[in-house]
Image (spheres, grey):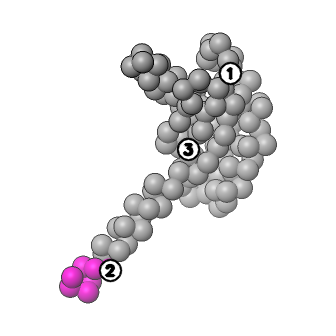
Amino acid sequence: MPEKGFRTRRVAELIRTEISRLLLADFQDAESGLLTVTRVDVTPDLLVARVHLSVFGGRDPRGLVERLERQKGVLRRALASRIKLKYNPELFFALDPGLEHQDRIDQLIEEAKKHGR
């Protein structure tokens, strides 16, 4: 079974790399801000890939994710031409809340320092 876990991680990293390249080429513009694929989670059967994104400086990060969801068929076909897998995974996009949580923790720490705690 460890082989299956290794393959899943390898495929997830490959998808992350290629989706990053596709997004840079086709979706990165001044309005969208800096778009980064933070991680990709792939199901063990490799049929579903959840792509986690972070957006810096964009006006409407949720609007960007909605745009990606509408264009996921195009992205899926482009991904299939770059990665040779038996089955091309279904793509789902989501904002990665990790950076927001980190910013909030930093803010709370700064507030605690100001109040002498």
Left or right relative to 113: residue 71: right
- Answer with mark 2 or mark 1, whichever residue precedes in sequence: 1
Residue for point 64% across, 43% down: 93
Left or right relative to 96: residue 103: left
Q: Assess disc 1: are there few (<14), some (14-19) or many (≥20) residues with their C-alpha within 10 Å of its C-alpha.
A: some
| Mark 2–mark 1 distance (CA, rounded to whole Å) | 48 Å
For the N terminus, the quadrant is: top left
**Looking at this view, is 22 or 107 the one in front?**
107
Q: Is residue 116 above or below residue 103?
A: below
Q: Which residue is mark 1?
A: 88
- Answer with mark 3 or mark 1, whichever residue precedes in sequence: 3
**Disc 1 on helix, strand or loop?**
loop
Residue 83 image offset from top left, x and y in percent: 61, 17
Is residue 28 visible in this depiction of the protein?
Answer: yes
| Amino acid of disc 3 | His
Q: Assess disc 2: are there few (<14), some (14-19) or many (≥20) residues with their C-alpha within 10 Å of its C-alpha.
A: few
Residue 67 image offset from top left, x and y in percent: 75, 47
**Disc 3 on helix, strand or loop?**
strand
